[in-house]
Image (cartoon, rainbow, N blue to C red):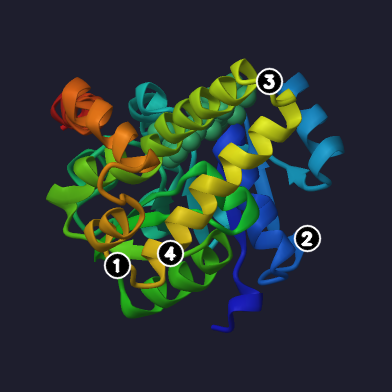
Amino acid sequence: MKMSEYRLGFIGFGHMAQIMFHAIDGARIIPRSQVQFIQRDSAKMKRSEQKHLITSTSMERLISTSDILLLCVRPAQAEQALQQIAPLGAGDKMILSILAGVPLSLFQKHLGPQAQVIRVMPNVASAIGQGMTILSARHASVDFREAASMLLAPLGPSLEVPEPLMDAATGLAASSPGFVFKLIQALALQGEKEGLSPKDSLTIAAQVFTGAGQLVAKGGDPIDLMMQIATPGGVTEAGFQVMEKTELAKHFQETVQAAIRKAKQFSEEYK
Ligand SMILES: NC(=O)c1ccc[n+]([C@@H]2O[C@H](COP(=O)([O-])OP(=O)(O)OC[C@H]3O[C@@H](n4cnc5c(N)ncnc54)[C@H](OP(=O)(O)O)[C@@H]3O)[C@@H](O)[C@H]2O)c1
């Protein structure tokens, strides 16, 4: 089956589903007429149709006419959604789940052990094709894996991990943009305190994170790079001394650990 012939059905069309839809649609992988969605609230669904120019439908029709179902509800809504879609034949479809902390075992419990599910963890930067998508695809056919890889390509780079690492990957890749926004905001606020305009401060802060990230992404070693810019007795070194004293790196790791702990807790709850 050619990629352009697949029919997609979004179950849940909130924040992350919309980001994914626009990335896939923008890359013209599948005609918009072959993409449908459903939400719980019919008034919201009408608004989404007008805003995003795609068609909503009933759950029965969405499942019967889709080849790939993208499950995009919140983790707490998973069990109810699975109970709803199981009797409609969802177990025979290819399923991409973006739910944080919802293990494959819950899908198998509701949809049967044969269910083909790929767990996908996108992040918000997918909106500009700069996401970091983590996936686990052990229970998927070669065709489904290929289709998923083409669908996810417009979101940015992706990386496959074994399912037990999905919770760690969720904290690292899906939650961390939030922590980085906090750091960008802190840097920008300091710029303002020093007299720079809010706009200039934010431009500098965003580009500092983008540029530093790109240097590492292109093969730079963080330790070498730190040594290059920290001349002994110099300006950057003064900052590093405070980072050491306040154990900033350790606190940052604790922040990420808290997110990972929460994802693991969800995984236990939803087993
Ligand atoms: N936000 C992120 O950065 C991020 C990153 C990675 C993964 N995720 C994952 O993405 C998922 C969705 O997050 P979100 O931020 O997009 O949430 P959201 O904006 O609340 O969207 C959830 C959507 O699911 C719909 N829904 C819930 N139960 C349903 C049902 N039984 N049938 C049909 N539709 C149903 C809701 O409908 P209504 O609109 O009618 O309420 C809503 O459209 C979560 O599982 C999260 O773990 C999010």
Q: Which residue is mark 3?
A: 195
* Quadrant in the picture for residue 44: top right
Where does the N terminus fall, quadrant-wise? bottom right
- Residue 215 got which mark? 4
Ranked by sequence position, the earlier of labels 1 and 4 is 1
Query: How many neighbours does mark 3 have within 10 angstroms: few (below 14), some (14-19), or many (20 or more)?
Result: few
Q: Residue at x 54, y 25 (%)?
A: 185
Residue flagged by tag 2: what amino acid is it?
Ser
Ranked by sequence position, the earlier of labels 4 and 3 is 3
Q: Residue 57 at x, y = what percent?
A: 70, 41
Residue flagged by tag 1: what amino acid is it?
Ala
- State the separation of the CA atoms marked 3 and 2: 52 Å
- State the separation of the CA atoms marked 4 and 2: 40 Å
Ranked by sequence position, the earlier of labels 3 and 2 is 2
Q: Which residue is mark 1?
A: 140
- Above or below 234: residue 84: above
Identity of the residue furthest to the right in this view: 50
Q: Which residue is mark 2?
A: 33
Instruction: Work out whether residue 49 or residue 159 is closer to the camera in this orientation and state it.
Output: 159
- State the separation of the CA atoms marked 4 and 3: 29 Å
**Residue 50 placement, left or right of 6:** right
Q: Residue 201 at x, y = what percent?
A: 65, 31
Identity of the residue furthest to the bottom in this view: 2
Instruction: Work out whether residue 173 or residue 199 is closer to the camera in this orientation and state it.
Output: 199
Q: Nearer the viewer, mark 4 or mark 3?
A: 3
- Above or below 187: residue 94: below
